[in-house]
């Protein structure tokens, strides 16, 4: 991917369509290496799980504030709209929350989002001038409602957070893509490079992932694989795949064949 095929989200333009997280790595050094290998321009961080004031050398915030990546703060761990909005307001005061990932969890076991609370928080945040990217169920109705209230993109899950199950419902994603007026970024459930490629081949505008890289046996190598998969999937979507056929079709032309 490059600026020849940019991803536009609100007022922001990105060359890479891969967004990556910062959790679960063994240390800040491994985090840095994986982020660099991924080629990502947008990096998300859970505001409630890092020390936002520790910006010294070797700290996570010190790494993320090197101005090498666009920081996408998220509200992981929030269970109400009020919690999520309050968290992002505090982050804005610290100067790190103009474009944000909204995440309001409805169930601690599945970590599925609460659609009602997510929509409520989105309305408030959009009115306050945030560029909002909400994590949501792969439901075309909630995606439409989030777009209608002014979200800059929607981020439907592929499968439960951290499950690595891959794209469980490509048909819902296709419906969302057909009707969406804003970018659709698959968020959660991607397990390996082929999952990311499938999402992009469906026409998704980007992929956000964390565990698939951080929990791989070789995170840096997996980050490279994800970078290539997202790029390949996007190119395949733009190229347009051949139609599927039930029967064989000769790959060489039959016209002019000498009997």
Image (tube, grey):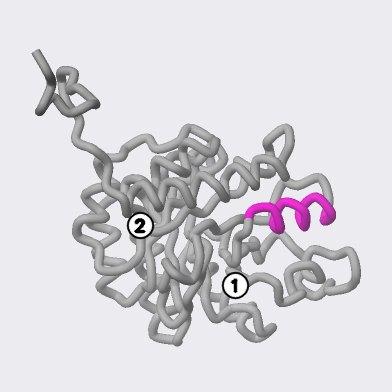
Looking at the rendering, in which quadrant would you find the C terminus? top left
Vertical side of 237 occupied by 144: above or below: below
Is residue 29 on the magenta stretch?
yes
State the residue in front, 42 or 72.
Answer: 42
Tag on residue 115?
A: 2
The residue beneath circle 1 is 87
Left or right for 100, reference 56: left
Q: Position of residue 56 (x, y in %)?
A: 89, 73
Q: Position of residue 151 (x, y in %)?
A: 36, 73
Q: Residue at x 38, y 52 (%)?
A: 156
Vertical side of 194 occupied by 256: above or below: above
Quadrant hosting residue 180: bottom left
Query: What stretch of residues is rendered in magenta?
Result: 28-38
Q: Residue at x 44, y 67 (%)?
A: 133
Q: Position of residue 64 (x, y in %)?
A: 73, 69
State the residue in front, 128 or 209.
Answer: 209
Give the residue furthest to the top. Answer: 259
Q: Position of residue 136 (x, y in %)?
A: 39, 55
Q: Secondary structure at mark 2?
A: helix
Vertical side of 112 occupied by 43: above or below: below
Vertical side of 142 occupied by 259: above or below: above
The numbered mark, 1 or 2, whose residue comes first in the sequence reads 1
């Amino acid at each position: 991917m490059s600026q020849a095929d940019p991803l536009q989200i609100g007022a922001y333009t990105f060359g890479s369509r891969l967004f990556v997280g910062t959790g679960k790595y063994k240390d800040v050094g491994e985090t840095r290496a994986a982020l660099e290998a991924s080629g990502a321009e947008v990096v998300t961080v859970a505001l409630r799980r890092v020390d936002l004031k520790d910006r010294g050398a070797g700290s996570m915030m010190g790494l993320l504030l090197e101005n090498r990546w666009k920081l996408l703060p998220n509200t992981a761990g929030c269970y109400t709209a009020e919690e999520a909005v309050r968290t992002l307001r505090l982050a804005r005061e610290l100067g790190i929350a103009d474009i944000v990932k909204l995440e309001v969890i409805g169930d601690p076991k599945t970590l599925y989002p609460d659609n009602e609370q997510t929509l409520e928080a989105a309305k408030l945040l959009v009115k306050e001038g945030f560029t909002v990217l909400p994590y949501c169920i792969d439901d075309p109705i909630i995606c439409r409602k989030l777009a209608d209230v002014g979200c800059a993109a929607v981020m439907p899950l592929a499968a439960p957070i951290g499950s690595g199950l891959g794209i469980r419902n490509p048909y819902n994603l296709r419906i969302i893509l057909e009707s969406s007026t804003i970018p659709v970024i698959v968020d959660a459930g991607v397990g390996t490079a082929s999952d990311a490629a499938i999402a992009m081949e469906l026409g998704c505008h980007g992929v956000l992932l964390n565990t698939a890289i951080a929990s791989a046996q070789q995170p840096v190598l997996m980050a490279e694989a994800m970078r290539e998969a997202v790029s390949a999937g996007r190119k395949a979507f733009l190229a347009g795949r051949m139609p599927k056929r039930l029967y064989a079709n000769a790959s060489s032309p039959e016209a002019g064949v000498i009997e």
